[in-house]
Image: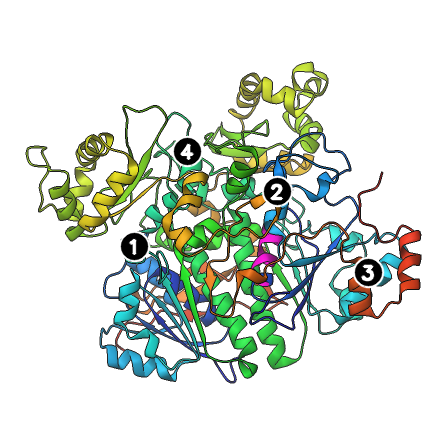
Amino acid sequence: MVNGPLNGIKILDLTHVWAGPLAVRFLADLGAEVVRVEAPSSRGPRVFPSSPIGGWMGGVPGDEPWNANAAFNKLMRNRQSFCVDMKQHSGRLAFLQLVAVADVVIENFSARAMPSLNLDYDVLREANPNIIYVTMPGFGSTGIYKDRVAFGPTVEAMSGLTYMFGYGRNQPRNTAMALLDPITATNSAAAVVTALRRRQQTSKGCRVELSLHEGGVAYSGPWLIDEQLGNVPCCIGNRHPGMAPHGVYPCDTEQAGESWIAVACANDHQWSALYLLIDAHGMMLNRSWSLSQRITHHDVVDECLSRWTASQNSQQATTRLQQAGVSAGPVNTAADMVADEQAMARNFFVDYESHGVPMPGNPIKMPELNTHEWTASPDLGADNADILKRWLNYDNRQIQALEEAGVIMNAPPA
Amino acid sequence: MANNPVRVLEIGGHSAGYSGRLFVRSGAEVVRIEPPEMVPSWASDAATNTYLHAGKQRINTQDVRLVGELADKADVVICEASCADQIDSWDFDNFLTPIKVAITPFGRTGPKRNWHATPHVLLAMGGYTHLMGDEDKAPLSLPGHYLEFQTGALAYTVANACLYARPHRDTKDVDIGMLETVMALSQFTVVRWHCTGDVRSRHGSDFWFISPSDLFRCADGWVYLTIVPGFWDPFVVFLQRPELSVDPRFCTNDDRMAHRDVLRNIIAETLVTLSKDRIESRAEACRVPLGAVKTFSEILKDPHLDQRRFWEEIDMHVSATTVRSPGLSFRIDDEVRPSLRLNDTENDHV
């Protein structure tokens, strides 16, 4: 546990994949004490059939590949791990005892999962009437879609984002980045603190529900209202209805490999500065064009700007545009991001894991939050004994009995 | 919480606006100071204001002293500005507010603290844009206010965490850089690059490691599907092509990856004649992960959202119109969504 405003809050983390673990990471970074309650096979088998999507910490699976999944570890800092088989009576009992002394239980299974384990809100509330229970089924636990299978990218299509995202009318694209997961993550963190404040004032626990679907639709809010006002929104590629030029332009076109720059003229002043910088005299552009004129002539503006960006690399072009007062930045790869001087100056990427892997930090900066306190993703079951002793006052004999019965463990089943 | 409402002063753009939106719905009293120059919105001003600012009191002033007085009386101030120096220009550091959150594109420190950036630029610098769009075309930027709303939600979260701790803690000063928000919300790009040496690239709408996963045209629009290995058997039932389950070209995800173009054509041929409704019904019956690409008019009429009482009503006051707006993205117990009103600027006595 690190220092922060959520010190004293105990969270039982049953989340998986991306939305839930990221939500809990934000809360852990703010000082909550988080215990990850993990099923023995939750991190995969003892031998992985293939390399995980983010690779292995250190580049190789090692003796315990289930503890070396880089994408998983990225999300799991500042937590402890309690690995328990809840299908066994004493495992379930230990979990409910933890619930009794926790503040929050958070999970992101399907709507069917917790009820099928006989661990729905009513059961948890019986163990602890003040518990805050957070669940995030893809379409919610009610309504006609509640039993549909929900993955971030498929639900994204239903949110309005896919309709607006792409290269233009009738050329939609999916971001293929599962954006509803990080949306649901921030919404969940916001929901937890709201529920904590509510409990502080009412002394009552509660059930908090989020759906990926509603989180995505909520982010389309301004467009949904515009639709009702008769301003029918549509996909306009990399352009913007209130800024021009606005796009992604090629750089260094003579060089091998791709390089791009994002440019956005947010006002007339920036346009005038851009016009002078790219030496647009004789290019059929006009320095005094208004926004609507720039939108009308966007094709020719893009052509002239692309000609200017093509002759230099994205860093050079960015520097010159920024010096002229124009919003611009390179289209960065992961390597570029880690090397960015701003990210380095603010110590955004943090090397708290093994093997020197730079992990994304916390965008919330406060004097009392110190990344030097951060702890790496715990190994599976690494804290079984500590949690049973510290949270539940189990003695060594009781813990040994649970280990011998295979109720708690620190490796996937053979 | 409405009995003793928290007072929030919101200064600035869409991030602060989103944060204030969440505060309104948690029972806080929110006063908004309009920024000197607003970053343009993706929707009309009327729509954006209705979505973000209903239920707030709004003031159009650049009077630093007045803003300082309001800040001193607030429990929380969320101040968003175009750069670090603009935060300073509000005399932010001298506000007496117990919880102060500054939002800027790059944060309040560092060599780029006064750079010019819109969300489009920050998404590019933060690694999102490089991953989106087709391999042989320009990268795509994200439309809408994703970055601002995500940052606003984080500002709301930390402010509430500080409110929770407030009886026992000192004044809080928070610095949120939007570039760091993007980078914190990255999927696995950085670890993959570091651990494997691979620079992730863009692949249109598909997940390059899963086949099939893509957008498909249908009779009245588009649908998106992602068939991870465990869903292959239900998927061939959905397609009404059971013979594919024993086709050696498609037995494993690796096989399907190797023959993804052939598979794509088979799926495209099947779906192109069917309507979105029919495809969705079939997917639901077969338990296949699939979503139809919805237009906004379809979303507004979505029976599932109606059943879940998702919408809230907002009285637009000036135009004497009531619209439905998305409610909060989370619900606590069965709390009822409020009806709200969009107030004019400067018409309120704060």
Residue type at mark 2: give it: Ala
The residues colored magenta run A18-27
Classify B321 as above or below A311: below
Report the predominant secondary structure element of the magenta stretch: helix
| Mark 1 or 4, nearer chain start | 1
Q: Quadrant of residue B33?
A: bottom left
Q: Residue, x 78% and y 63% (percent of image)? A: A387
Nearest to viewer (mark 1 / mark 4): 4
Report which residue position mark 4 lands on. Answer: B133
State yes or no: residue A19 in magenta: yes
Report which residue position mark 1 lands on. Answer: B44
Label 1 to label 3: alpha-carbon separation: 57 Å
Residue type at mark 1: give it: Ser
Report which residue position mark 3 lands on. Answer: A385
Label 1 to label 2: alpha-carbon separation: 43 Å
Label 1 in the same subunit as label 4? yes
- In the image: residue B88, left or right of residue B20: left
Residue type at mark 4: give it: Gly
Residue type at mark 3: give it: Ala
Report which residue position mark 2 lands on. Answer: A70
| Residue B3: image location, x then y, percent | 52, 84
Nearest to viewer (mark 1 / mark 2): 2
Label 3 to label 2: alpha-carbon separation: 25 Å
